[in-house]
Amino acid sequence: MPTQINQIETDDRVYFRVEGDMYAEDALLLERLVRDTRSAGNDLVTIDLADLSFLDSESASILRRMESEGVVEIEGIEFFLQSAIDVAERAA
């Protein structure tokens, strides 16, 4: 499924809701959108990954870097955590 990125603005925060499959090119586009939003004066930016169905390792690295730099907050990763736990349990 192609990646869809929707921007949702509230009174105090901008959300980028990501759906579909995310690859490095998509994560770089998302990073550019986030940085442009912050440059426009919106300091509170959140990426919502709740509807994401696939995330490759390069994309994960880009998202992790943005979060560790304090550029964004990331929500909705519970699905990926549960998937990792399921894989680990099957392998054990």
Image (spheres, rainbow, N blue to C red):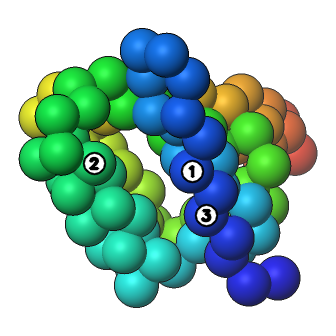
Left or right side of 58 for 85: right
Distance CA(mark 1)–CA(mark 2)? 10 Å
Looking at the rendering, in which quadrant would you find the C terminus? top right
Residue drawn 32% across the image and 23% down it: 44
Q: Position of residue 5 (x, y in %)?
A: 61, 63
User: Amino acid under label 2?
Assistant: Thr
63 above or below 92?
below
Quarter occupied by residue 49: top right
Q: Nearer the viewer, mark 2 or mark 3?
A: 2
Q: Are the residues flagged by discs 1 and 2 in contact, CB closer than 8 Å?
A: yes
User: Amino acid under label 3?
Assistant: Ile
Residue marked by disc 1: 7
Left or right side of 23 for 59: left
Residue drawn 40% across the image and 64% down it: 30
Q: Are the residues flagged by discs 3 and 1 in contact, CB closer than 8 Å?
A: yes
Residue marked by disc 2: 37
**Can the viewer see residue 44?**
yes
Residue drawn 49% across the image and 16% down it: 11
Q: Nearer the viewer, mark 3 or mark 1?
A: 1
Secondary element type, mark 3:
strand
Quarter occupied by residue 1: bottom right
Distance CA(mark 2)–CA(mark 3)? 14 Å
51 above or below 32?
above
| Along the line of sight, the residue nearer the viewer: 17 or 38 | 38
Secondary element type, mark 2:
helix
User: Amino acid under label 1?
Assistant: Gln
